């Protein structure tokens, strides 16, 4: 039997910078009243927290087992293991009850935190103590977001002979990856990897694409979700459109192309890009003259298929039933306008990396020629195929990332894609000088360090030092920075500046999270079940996450995670039921389960 | 050349207002955003590095903190919230204590007991010496002149033939010489540590003369300050500086012309000068007080206790000075006398603490630091040229 007198619970205050949402007083009361542990101490009340002090305490109360409870108690663990060693006890008897590890971060989750402490007390792994409340699962799956993660997950599930709905907000699947020219570190063509997958999705009998649609409501229980989807009016019939392009040719209204990151123009009736899936046209209601004024209708007149274009089509709401949901909503790039001193939106030729990605892309607005911005006849700033070529390009890393004023986290991909862009500049304009300004070069993956060395050998000036500001002098852009390695102040004039903008959660990620009942972490990314143990699951049953919406990552990691999510979904379908998930289970139930399991263990002994 | 690493340096400097020295990850943003940096003098990042590494000797002989005017752009744009601007401010406090050979400055910055004790002692000493040796004397009616003002020099009988104004003048000069002596010796100490002991620097003699204009020019105009953002602050600071200089001239050099019996018309030069000086000091004081309370700009966000002490003491001196003037013109005899005593009782400890040992010493250190920096740069340049010549 557990002896309560020999067990001590230490309450650990949050580590620097973390906010404490769960009241440790509640935990203390719980431990004393319910677990009947008499030695409950607050670490904050110990004046000098070192092994010496703790060992004295251990000795005087004859303690053999220690539980550290707190937001991140691992921070304090070494002190206690050392103290246990000092008094000759087994250091393995220091147990951790970390709240944030299992998603108990808000005050409302105090119950969960108590359950976590109870599990540590009963020496039962928390995951095991979650009562198995299985619900029968429907075989259909909804994948939210048609980027590379969504495509991968949809394909893997569908190839397992299960029905998949692929929901996509824009007119085509493909996401951000379709906009890229090359992938690092192999410099493979992004489209060569992506487009076959897109076509496969388009032709797969078990995948139903819901493009140009958005999720409005999710009801039901894990295993049997009822999802309402708003199918926005495409105004072009998907089944009859032959994609001939006559309508776009004759359409009088122009608009900035989202797919080209607003570096180029498209028509009001358009196809996002030539390899789009589905390869059908759609009408942008915001710019269409007919929708706005009720006059025009040129597209209807020139369309060779009768009744294909219906300018008066209305949005339509559909409802589907699914058992599992995979969330792969991806990211948006940091808005460089927020940092005024880099001059984005103020100076010509200061572009974001995503815009530059379109400029170097052969399918982009300049046909792959890197050119300077110029004014067209109407005064719009545009990039043209035959424009002037920059003689020097500066690339600034960490825009909006690793910055206390914006995003504290590292966006993980910017260093590598900046090196890739530098290489592409050198490839297309061998005479151009390229300057890279970085804080730390994070080449963390397989073949990445080698890639960095290769790019450095190509004659690119890689400068350690964050650029502080960009100013304009005689039509050129001047970058001011310190070269940390040579202790020099650099004032470098370049023709074009590329801002390596970081990744951030989509604006409406929080709204989607509330609709789905999943949680987000302090940075706004969707919260996974366990960062190391189960990075695709969530605390809500039947909902998995994959890709950048869970945290910044590159394409290989995204694809891997999407496959993992698909396998988790297939597992549920094969078993025929879905676990309830933590969100709807009471803390008491977990405690009860933990106690039961610990009893069982003792009986076995 | 070797340097000793001082592990306790970071902790020693805490009392001067330095915090979070480990936040910095050396991206170089602060150096690059600073309008004052140039190749050869790269701060504040270099100074953070020196602090992190505990290179006390290098830090103590470093002129960078004096070249910073704290516009706060580095702090605003710092990606790590490491607050380099405040670090430079704290280093200025530290350097003041390093240059001071008496050791009093360090005591004043790090101990309230010493600072307030020193001020309180001189406050009491001034009041006591007035009450004992220079008490209010004479008939109230006799002390009013034709214009209805107080005849200030007859308030006190004087000692052994010396009149009141003579005694005050002697006191002024004694204090001016004492303070100037301390300040000059500190500057020589600074010169010794920064220029003479720096083996890498060889300054040709004529450079001392050719660069001297920069010292005068910077002292008079603080033109480098105007390069930073926030011109109001520079104008205000210039008003304070000129106001104070005029006040100093009037009460030390021209005292017999200033402390006089008759009440001259308001447009007389000595009254106008007094008004300008009072306005200059008061304007900047109010400006600084408001911005420090509101924390409206970066340089006002973090206030060391000594910053507030300086503001309070200077404010009290100014207000009591104004009251003396009002009471004198109004013909209020005893009020004039007691206010005069309080005025001096605040002024004397303020000058003794602030000018040689505390915040006010920057009036000398900053222009001299710019001067020494130019000398060092001169020597660097000439050495480089020599190398080039030899190489050729």
Image: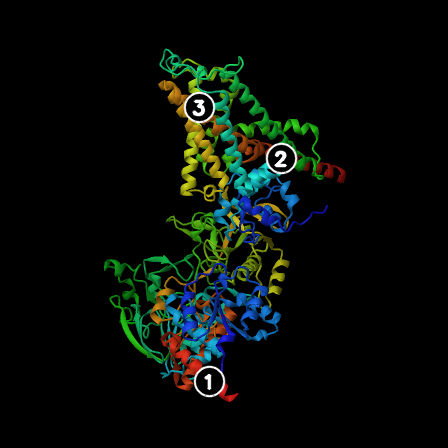
Q: Which residue is mark 2?
A: B102
In the image, residue B275 lies at what x, y percent? 42, 23
Asked if labels 2 and 3 share a chain, the reply is yes
Residue B268, by quadrant, is top left
* Residue depicted at x 51% and y 70%: A557
Residue B60 falls left or right of residue A207: right
Colour style of the rendered protein structure? rainbow
How packed mark 3 is, by other alpha carbons closer than 10 Å (few <14, some 14-19, many 20 or more), is some
Q: Would residue A142 be seen by someone viewing this image from the given angle?
A: no
Instruction: Chain letter for mark 2, please.
Output: B
Asked if labels 1 and 3 share a chain, the reply is no
Q: Is residue B176 above or below residue A82?
A: above
Rounded to the nearest whole Å, what is the CA distance between mark 1 and mark 3? 87 Å
Task: Please state which of residues B35 and A584 is positioned toward the viewer in this rendering.
Answer: A584
Residue B143, by quadrant, is top left
Asked if labels 2 and 1 share a chain, the reply is no
Q: Which residue is mark 1?
A: A599
Q: Secondary structure at mark 2?
A: loop
* CB under 8 Å between discs 2 and 3: no
Residue A324 falls left or right of residue B375: left
Q: Which residue is mark 3?
A: B340
Q: Is residue B9 above or below residue A83?
A: above
Q: Is residue B260 above or below residue A593?
A: above
Task: Please state which of residues B391 and A98 is positioned toward the viewer in this rendering.
Answer: A98
Rounded to the nearest whole Å, what is the CA distance between mark 2 and mark 1? 74 Å
Residue B101, by quadrant, is top right
What residue occupies the far left of the structure in this picture? A294
């Amino acid at each position: 039997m557990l002896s309560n007198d020999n067990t001590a619970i230490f309450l650990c205050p949050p580590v620097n910078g973390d906010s404490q949402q769960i009241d440790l007083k509640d935990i203390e009361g719980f431990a004393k009243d319910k677990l009947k542990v008499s030695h409950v101490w607050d670490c904050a009340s110990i004046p000098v927290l070192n092994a010496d002090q703790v060992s004295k305490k251990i000795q005087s109360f004859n303690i053999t087992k220690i539980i550290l409870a707190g937001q991140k108690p691992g921070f304090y663990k070494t002190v206690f293991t050392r103290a246990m060693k000092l008094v000759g006890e087994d250091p393995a008897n220091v147990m951790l009850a970390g709240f944030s590890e299992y998603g108990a971060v808000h005050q409302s989750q105090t119950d969960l935190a108590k359950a976590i402490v109870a599990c540590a007390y009963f020496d039962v792994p928390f995951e095991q103590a979650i009562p198995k409340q299985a619900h029968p699962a429907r075989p259909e799956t909804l994948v939210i977001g048609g980027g590379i993660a969504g495509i991968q997950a949809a394909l893997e599930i569908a190839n397992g002979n299960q029905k998949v709905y692929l929901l996509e907000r824009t007119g085509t699947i493909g996401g951000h990856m379709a906009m890229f020219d090359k992938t690092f570190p192999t410099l493979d063509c992004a489209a060569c990897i992506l487009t076959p997958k897109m076509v496969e999705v388009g032709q797969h009998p078990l995948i139903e694409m819901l493009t140009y649609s958005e999720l409005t409501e999710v009801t039901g229980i894990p295993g049997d979700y009822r999802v309402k989807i708003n199918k926005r009016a495409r105004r072009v019939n998907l089944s009859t459109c032959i994609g001939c392009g006559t309508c776009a040719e004759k359409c009088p209204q122009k608009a900035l192309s989202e797919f080209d990151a607003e570096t180029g123009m498209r028509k009001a009736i358009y196809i996002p890009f030539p390899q789009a899936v589905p390869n059908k046209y759609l009408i942008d209601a915001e710019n269409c003259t007919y929708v706005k004024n009720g006059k025009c209708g040129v597209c209807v007149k020139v369309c060779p298929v009768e009744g294909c274009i219906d300018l008066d089509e209305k949005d339509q709401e559909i409802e589907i039933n699914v058992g599992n949901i995979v969330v792969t909503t991806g990211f948006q790039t940091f808005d460089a306008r927020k940092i005024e001193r880099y001059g984005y939106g103020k100076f010509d030729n200061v572009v974001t990396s995503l815009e530059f990605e379109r400029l170097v892309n052969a399918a982009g607005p300049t046909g792959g020629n890197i050119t300077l911005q110029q004014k067209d006849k109407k005064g719009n700033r545009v990039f043209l195929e035959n424009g002037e070529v920059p003689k020097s390009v500066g690339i600034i890393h960490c825009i909006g990332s690793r910055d206390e004023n914006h995003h504290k986290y590292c966006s993980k991909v910017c260093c590598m894609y900046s090196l890739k862009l530098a290489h592409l500049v050198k490839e297309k304009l061998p005479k151009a000088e390229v300057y890279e300004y970085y804080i730390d070069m994070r080449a963390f993956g397989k073949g990445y360090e080698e890639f960095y060395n290769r790019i450095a050998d190509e004659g690119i000036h890689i400068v350690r030092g964050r650029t502080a500001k960009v100013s304009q002098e005689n039509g050129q852009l001047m970058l001011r920075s310190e070269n940390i390695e040579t202790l020099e102040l650099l004032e470098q004039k370049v023709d074009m500046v590329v801002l390596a903008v970081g990744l951030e959660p989509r604006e409406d990620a929080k709204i989607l999270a509330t609709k789905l009942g999943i949680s987000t972490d302090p940075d706004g990314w969707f919260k996974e079940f366990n960062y190391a143990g189960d990075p695709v699951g969530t605390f809500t049953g039947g909902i998995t996450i994959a890709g950048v919406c869970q945290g910044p990552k590159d394409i290989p990691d995204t694809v891997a995670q999407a496959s993992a999510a698909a396998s988790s979904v297939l597992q549920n379908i094969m078993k025929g039921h879905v676990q309830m998930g933590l969100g709807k289970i009471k803390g008491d139930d977990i405690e009860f389960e933990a106690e039961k399991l610990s009893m069982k263990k003792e009986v076995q002994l | 050349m070797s340097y000793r690493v001082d592990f306790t340096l970071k902790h020693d400097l805490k009392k001067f207002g330095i915090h979070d020295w480990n936040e910095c990850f050396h991206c170089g943003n602060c150096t690059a955003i600073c309008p004052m940096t140039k190749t050869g003098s790269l701060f504040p990042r270099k100074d953070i590095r020196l602090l992190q590494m505990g290179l006390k000797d290098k830090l103590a002989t470093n002129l960078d903190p004096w070249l910073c005017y704290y516009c706060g752009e580095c702090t605003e744009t710092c990606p790590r919230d490491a607050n380099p601007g405040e670090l430079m401010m704290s280093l200025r406090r530290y350097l003041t204590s390093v240059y001071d050979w008496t050791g009093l400055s360090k005591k004043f910055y790090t101990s309230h007991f010493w600072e307030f004790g020193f001020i309180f002692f001189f406050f009491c000493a001034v009041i006591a010496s007035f009450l004992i040796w220079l008490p209010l004397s004479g008939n109230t009616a006799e002390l009013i002149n034709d214009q209805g003002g107080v005849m200030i020099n007859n308030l006190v009988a004087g000692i052994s033939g010396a009149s009141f104004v003579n005694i005050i003048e002697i006191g002024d000069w004694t204090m001016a010489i004492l303070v100037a002596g301390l300040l000059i010796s500190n500057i020589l100490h600074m010169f010794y540590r920064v220029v003479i002991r720096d083996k890498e620097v060889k300054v040709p003699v004529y450079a001392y003369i050719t660069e001297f204009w920069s010292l005068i020019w910077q002292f008079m105009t603080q033109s480098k300050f105007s390069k930073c953002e926030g011109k109001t602050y520079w104008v205000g600071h210039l008003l304070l500086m000129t106001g104070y200089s005029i006040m100093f001239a009037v009460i030390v050099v021209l005292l017999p012309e200033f402390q006089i019996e008759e009440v001259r018309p308001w447009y007389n030069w000595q009254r106008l000068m007094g008004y300008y000086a009072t306005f200059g000091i008061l304007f900047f004081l109010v400006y600084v007080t408001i911005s420090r309370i509101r924390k409206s700009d970066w340089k006002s966000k973090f206030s060391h206790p000594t910053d507030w002490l300086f503001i309070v003491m200077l404010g009290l001196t100014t207000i009591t000075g104004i009251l003396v003037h009002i009471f004198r013109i109004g013909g209020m005899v005893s009020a004039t006398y007691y206010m005069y005593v309080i005025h001096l009782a605040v002024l004397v400890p303020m000058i003794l603490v602030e000018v040689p040992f505390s915040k006010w010493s920057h009036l000398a250190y900053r222009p001299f630091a710019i001067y020494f920096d130019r000398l060092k740069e001169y020597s660097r340049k000439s050495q480089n040229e020599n190398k080039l010549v030899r190489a050729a």
